[in-house]
Amino acid sequence: MNGYFEQLKTAWLGRDVRFLQETESTNRDCDVAAAAGVTEGLVICAETQTAGRGRLGRTWFSPQHVNLYFSILLRPAVDPVAATTLPLVVGLAVAETLMESFPALAPKIKWPNDIWIQGRKVCGILCEMQLTGERVGAVVAGVGINVNLTRALFPEELRASATALQQEVGHTVERGVLLASIMNHLEPLYCAWQQQGFAPLAERIQRVDALRGQPLRMHLVGNPVEGLGAGIQADGALLIRLSDRTLQAIYSGEAQTIRMLD
Protein backbone atom coordinates (compact mmCIF):
# COMPACT_ATOMS: atom_id res chain seq x y z
CA MET A 1 0.00 0.00 0.00
CA ASN A 2 1.32 3.42 -0.96
CA GLY A 3 3.23 5.20 1.77
CA TYR A 4 3.19 2.38 4.33
CA PHE A 5 6.90 1.66 4.68
CA GLU A 6 7.84 5.31 4.18
CA GLN A 7 5.70 6.33 7.17
CA LEU A 8 6.31 3.32 9.45
CA LYS A 9 8.43 4.23 12.49
CA THR A 10 7.99 1.18 14.70
CA ALA A 11 10.77 -1.02 16.05
CA TRP A 12 8.94 -4.31 15.47
CA LEU A 13 5.18 -3.90 15.02
CA GLY A 14 4.11 -4.22 11.39
CA ARG A 15 7.64 -4.71 10.10
CA ASP A 16 6.53 -8.16 8.91
CA VAL A 17 3.48 -7.29 6.81
CA ARG A 18 1.63 -9.38 4.24
CA PHE A 19 -0.62 -7.61 1.75
CA LEU A 20 -3.25 -9.88 0.18
CA GLN A 21 -5.65 -9.15 -2.65
CA GLU A 22 -8.35 -11.38 -1.20
CA THR A 23 -8.82 -13.70 1.75
CA GLU A 24 -11.67 -15.20 3.73
CA SER A 25 -10.63 -13.44 6.95
CA THR A 26 -7.41 -11.76 8.01
CA ASN A 27 -8.10 -12.92 11.58
CA ARG A 28 -8.26 -16.51 10.37
CA ASP A 29 -4.97 -16.08 8.49
CA CYS A 30 -3.35 -14.62 11.60
CA ASP A 31 -4.72 -17.49 13.71
CA VAL A 32 -2.93 -19.94 11.41
CA ALA A 33 0.30 -17.93 11.62
CA ALA A 34 0.05 -17.81 15.42
CA ALA A 35 -0.44 -21.57 15.66
CA ALA A 36 2.62 -22.01 13.43
CA GLY A 37 4.76 -20.03 15.89
CA VAL A 38 5.19 -16.79 13.95
CA THR A 39 6.73 -13.99 16.04
CA GLU A 40 4.46 -11.23 17.30
CA GLY A 41 4.19 -8.09 15.25
CA LEU A 42 3.00 -9.74 12.04
CA VAL A 43 0.30 -7.76 10.21
CA ILE A 44 -1.92 -9.31 7.53
CA CYS A 45 -3.85 -6.80 5.42
CA ALA A 46 -6.31 -7.66 2.64
CA GLU A 47 -8.00 -5.65 -0.09
CA THR A 48 -11.19 -7.61 0.51
CA GLN A 49 -12.51 -10.39 2.75
CA THR A 50 -15.06 -12.96 1.68
CA ALA A 51 -15.93 -13.97 5.25
CA GLY A 52 -14.90 -11.03 7.44
CA ARG A 53 -15.97 -11.42 11.05
CA GLY A 54 -17.25 -8.99 13.65
CA ARG A 55 -18.10 -9.33 17.33
CA LEU A 56 -20.59 -12.06 18.38
CA GLY A 57 -20.29 -13.82 15.02
CA ARG A 58 -21.55 -10.89 12.96
CA THR A 59 -20.24 -10.41 9.42
CA TRP A 60 -18.07 -7.45 8.40
CA PHE A 61 -18.94 -5.71 5.13
CA SER A 62 -15.67 -5.86 3.13
CA PRO A 63 -15.82 -4.28 -0.35
CA GLN A 64 -12.52 -4.23 -2.21
CA HIS A 65 -9.97 -1.44 -2.71
CA VAL A 66 -11.63 1.15 -0.46
CA ASN A 67 -11.14 0.21 3.21
CA LEU A 68 -8.60 -1.20 5.64
CA TYR A 69 -9.00 -4.81 6.82
CA PHE A 70 -6.03 -6.01 8.83
CA SER A 71 -5.09 -8.30 11.70
CA ILE A 72 -2.15 -8.08 14.08
CA LEU A 73 -0.48 -11.04 15.78
CA LEU A 74 0.43 -10.25 19.39
CA ARG A 75 1.85 -12.41 22.16
CA PRO A 76 1.33 -10.34 25.33
CA ALA A 77 2.95 -11.45 28.57
CA VAL A 78 -0.24 -10.93 30.57
CA ASP A 79 -2.84 -13.22 32.11
CA PRO A 80 -6.02 -14.03 30.15
CA VAL A 81 -8.21 -11.71 32.24
CA ALA A 82 -5.92 -8.73 31.58
CA ALA A 83 -5.88 -9.56 27.86
CA THR A 84 -9.63 -8.83 27.62
CA THR A 85 -8.81 -5.09 27.76
CA LEU A 86 -6.71 -5.25 24.58
CA PRO A 87 -9.61 -4.21 22.25
CA LEU A 88 -9.77 -0.90 24.14
CA VAL A 89 -5.99 -0.43 23.77
CA VAL A 90 -6.23 -1.03 20.02
CA GLY A 91 -9.26 1.27 19.91
CA LEU A 92 -7.30 4.02 21.64
CA ALA A 93 -4.52 3.69 19.06
CA VAL A 94 -7.04 4.06 16.22
CA ALA A 95 -8.86 6.97 17.88
CA GLU A 96 -5.64 8.88 18.61
CA THR A 97 -4.41 8.25 15.07
CA LEU A 98 -7.60 9.75 13.66
CA MET A 99 -7.39 12.74 16.02
CA GLU A 100 -3.82 13.43 14.92
CA SER A 101 -4.41 12.84 11.21
CA PHE A 102 -7.76 14.64 10.98
CA PRO A 103 -7.94 17.28 13.75
CA ALA A 104 -11.45 18.36 12.72
CA LEU A 105 -12.85 14.93 13.54
CA ALA A 106 -13.92 13.96 17.03
CA PRO A 107 -13.65 10.15 17.08
CA LYS A 108 -15.05 8.34 20.10
CA ILE A 109 -14.52 4.86 21.50
CA LYS A 110 -17.82 3.05 21.78
CA TRP A 111 -17.22 0.35 24.39
CA PRO A 112 -16.14 -2.39 23.97
CA ASN A 113 -14.76 -2.45 20.44
CA ASP A 114 -15.96 0.26 18.03
CA ILE A 115 -14.91 3.74 16.94
CA TRP A 116 -17.62 6.28 16.20
CA ILE A 117 -17.62 9.61 14.39
CA GLN A 118 -20.67 11.79 14.99
CA GLY A 119 -22.54 8.81 16.40
CA ARG A 120 -21.88 6.52 13.45
CA LYS A 121 -19.53 3.54 13.29
CA VAL A 122 -16.32 3.97 11.32
CA CYS A 123 -14.23 1.13 12.79
CA GLY A 124 -14.72 -2.24 14.45
CA ILE A 125 -12.18 -4.30 16.39
CA LEU A 126 -12.24 -8.04 17.04
CA CYS A 127 -9.62 -9.59 19.35
CA GLU A 128 -9.42 -13.37 19.54
CA MET A 129 -7.26 -15.18 22.09
CA GLN A 130 -5.33 -18.43 21.83
CA LEU A 131 -4.52 -20.04 25.19
CA THR A 132 -1.56 -22.26 25.99
CA GLY A 133 -2.70 -24.01 29.12
CA GLU A 134 -3.69 -21.16 31.41
CA ARG A 135 -1.46 -18.62 29.68
CA VAL A 136 -2.03 -16.37 26.71
CA GLY A 137 -0.37 -17.95 23.71
CA ALA A 138 -1.42 -15.26 21.26
CA VAL A 139 -4.01 -12.59 20.62
CA VAL A 140 -5.11 -11.75 17.09
CA ALA A 141 -6.39 -8.17 16.88
CA GLY A 142 -8.53 -7.66 13.79
CA VAL A 143 -9.41 -4.14 12.67
CA GLY A 144 -11.81 -2.98 9.97
CA ILE A 145 -11.93 0.73 9.08
CA ASN A 146 -14.26 2.34 6.56
CA VAL A 147 -11.85 4.62 4.73
CA ASN A 148 -12.85 5.57 1.16
CA LEU A 149 -16.26 3.93 1.12
CA THR A 150 -18.84 6.24 -0.45
CA ARG A 151 -22.39 6.42 0.87
CA ALA A 152 -23.67 4.82 -2.35
CA LEU A 153 -21.54 1.72 -1.73
CA PHE A 154 -22.96 1.13 1.76
CA PRO A 155 -25.78 -1.41 1.98
CA GLU A 156 -29.07 0.35 2.70
CA GLU A 157 -29.26 -1.14 6.20
CA LEU A 158 -25.90 0.42 7.19
CA ARG A 159 -26.30 3.96 5.82
CA ALA A 160 -27.87 5.38 8.98
CA SER A 161 -25.49 3.70 11.43
CA ALA A 162 -22.10 3.70 9.64
CA THR A 163 -19.78 6.23 8.05
CA ALA A 164 -16.37 6.37 6.35
CA LEU A 165 -13.41 8.72 6.69
CA GLN A 166 -13.78 10.06 3.15
CA GLN A 167 -17.36 11.09 3.89
CA GLU A 168 -16.26 12.93 7.03
CA VAL A 169 -13.16 14.74 5.74
CA GLY A 170 -14.31 15.35 2.16
CA HIS A 171 -11.36 13.78 0.34
CA THR A 172 -9.74 10.43 -0.39
CA VAL A 173 -7.52 9.07 2.40
CA GLU A 174 -4.25 7.25 1.67
CA ARG A 175 -4.79 3.87 3.28
CA GLY A 176 -1.13 2.85 3.53
CA VAL A 177 -0.23 6.04 5.40
CA LEU A 178 -3.17 5.54 7.76
CA LEU A 179 -2.17 1.93 8.46
CA ALA A 180 1.42 2.94 9.25
CA SER A 181 0.21 5.69 11.59
CA ILE A 182 -1.93 3.21 13.52
CA MET A 183 1.10 0.93 13.96
CA ASN A 184 3.16 3.92 15.15
CA HIS A 185 0.55 4.75 17.79
CA LEU A 186 -0.18 1.19 18.85
CA GLU A 187 3.38 -0.02 19.51
CA PRO A 188 4.09 2.30 22.51
CA LEU A 189 0.53 1.87 23.85
CA TYR A 190 0.84 -1.91 23.71
CA CYS A 191 4.24 -1.87 25.43
CA ALA A 192 2.96 0.43 28.19
CA TRP A 193 -0.14 -1.74 28.64
CA GLN A 194 2.02 -4.87 29.08
CA GLN A 195 4.32 -3.20 31.59
CA GLN A 196 1.82 -1.12 33.61
CA GLY A 197 -1.58 -2.64 32.92
CA PHE A 198 -4.73 -1.04 31.60
CA ALA A 199 -5.38 1.45 34.42
CA PRO A 200 -2.87 4.14 33.28
CA LEU A 201 -4.55 4.20 29.84
CA ALA A 202 -8.07 4.41 31.24
CA GLU A 203 -7.92 8.20 31.67
CA ARG A 204 -7.05 8.69 27.99
CA ILE A 205 -9.93 6.43 27.03
CA GLN A 206 -12.33 8.31 29.32
CA ARG A 207 -11.71 11.47 27.27
CA VAL A 208 -13.07 9.78 24.14
CA ASP A 209 -15.74 7.56 25.75
CA ALA A 210 -18.83 7.73 23.50
CA LEU A 211 -21.14 6.22 26.14
CA ARG A 212 -20.28 8.33 29.17
CA GLY A 213 -23.35 10.22 30.37
CA GLN A 214 -25.57 8.64 27.72
CA PRO A 215 -28.83 6.79 28.49
CA LEU A 216 -28.29 3.17 27.54
CA ARG A 217 -30.19 -0.07 27.19
CA MET A 218 -28.01 -3.17 27.28
CA HIS A 219 -29.11 -6.72 26.64
CA LEU A 220 -26.95 -8.98 28.76
CA VAL A 221 -26.89 -12.75 28.90
CA GLY A 222 -30.20 -13.35 30.63
CA ASN A 223 -31.58 -9.86 31.31
CA PRO A 224 -31.75 -6.26 30.05
CA VAL A 225 -30.21 -3.33 31.94
CA GLU A 226 -30.95 0.39 31.54
CA GLY A 227 -29.03 3.31 32.97
CA LEU A 228 -26.54 6.06 32.26
CA GLY A 229 -23.03 5.33 31.03
CA ALA A 230 -20.70 6.22 33.89
CA GLY A 231 -17.25 5.57 32.45
CA ILE A 232 -14.86 2.65 32.15
CA GLN A 233 -13.26 0.92 35.12
CA ALA A 234 -9.55 0.28 35.50
CA ASP A 235 -10.21 -3.36 34.53
CA GLY A 236 -11.99 -2.37 31.30
CA ALA A 237 -15.57 -2.90 32.48
CA LEU A 238 -18.27 -0.42 31.48
CA LEU A 239 -19.97 1.27 34.43
CA ILE A 240 -23.74 1.83 34.29
CA ARG A 241 -25.52 4.08 36.79
CA LEU A 242 -28.89 2.46 37.49
CA SER A 243 -32.12 4.25 38.41
CA ASP A 244 -31.39 3.75 42.12
CA ARG A 245 -28.01 5.55 41.60
CA THR A 246 -25.97 2.40 42.18
CA LEU A 247 -23.22 1.45 39.76
CA GLN A 248 -23.13 -1.85 37.89
CA ALA A 249 -20.00 -3.07 36.11
CA ILE A 250 -20.59 -4.75 32.74
CA TYR A 251 -17.89 -6.89 31.12
CA SER A 252 -17.61 -7.27 27.37
CA GLY A 253 -18.45 -10.96 27.36
CA GLU A 254 -21.78 -10.22 29.06
CA ALA A 255 -23.10 -7.60 26.64
CA GLN A 256 -25.06 -8.87 23.66
CA THR A 257 -26.32 -5.49 22.42
CA ILE A 258 -25.82 -1.89 23.55
CA ARG A 259 -28.21 0.85 22.41
CA MET A 260 -28.33 4.55 23.17
CA LEU A 261 -31.82 5.73 24.11
CA ASP A 262 -33.41 8.92 22.79
Image (cartoon, rainbow, N blue to C red):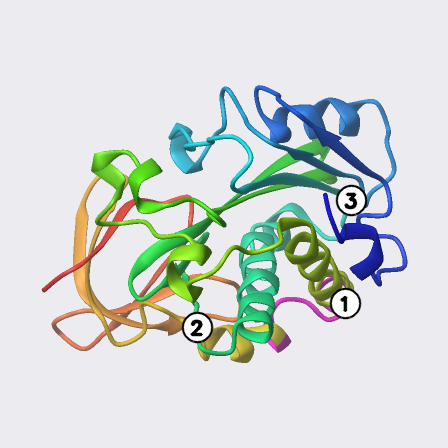
Crowding at dot 1, Cα within 10 Å, few <14 / some 14-19 / many 20+, comes out as some
Dominant SS of magenta comes to helix
Q: Nearer the viewer, mark 3 or mark 1?
A: 1
Q: Amino acid at mark 3?
A: Arg
Q: Nearer the viewer, mark 1 or mark 2?
A: 2
Judge by depth and name the residue closer to the eye, 92 or 148: 148
User: Can you give x and y, in whole percent of width and height, for residue 204 in the image?
Assistant: 55, 78
Q: Is residue 89 above or below residue 76?
A: below
Q: Quadrant of residue 259?
A: bottom left
The residue carrying mark 2 is: 105
Q: Are marks 3 and 2 in contact (CB under 8 Å)?
A: no
Q: Looking at the figure, which quarter contains the N terminus?
A: top right
Q: What span is colored magenta in the figure?
A: 192-200
User: Can you give x and y, in whole percent of width and height, for residue 65 in the image?
Assistant: 56, 35
Q: Nearer the viewer, mark 3 or mark 2?
A: 2
Q: Describe the element under mark 2 as helix, strand or loop.
A: loop
User: Quick one: label 1 or label 2, which is nearer the N terminus?
Assistant: 2
Image side of residue 66 versus residue 200, left or right: left
Q: Is residue 199 magenta?
A: yes
Q: Residue furthest front?
A: 171
Question: From mark 3 to mark 1, how far is it between C-alphas?
Answer: 15 Å
Q: Amino acid at mark 1?
A: Pro
The residue carrying mark 1 is: 188
The residue carrying mark 3 is: 75
User: Quick one: label 3 or label 2, which is nearer the N terminus?
Assistant: 3
Q: Quadrant of residue 166?
A: bottom left
Q: Is residue 80 magenta?
A: no
User: Quick one: label 3 or label 1, which is nearer the N terminus?
Assistant: 3
Asked if residue 109 can be seen in this view, the reply is yes
Question: From mark 1 to mark 2, how far is it between C-alphas?
Answer: 23 Å
Q: Is residue 28 above or below residue 123?
A: above
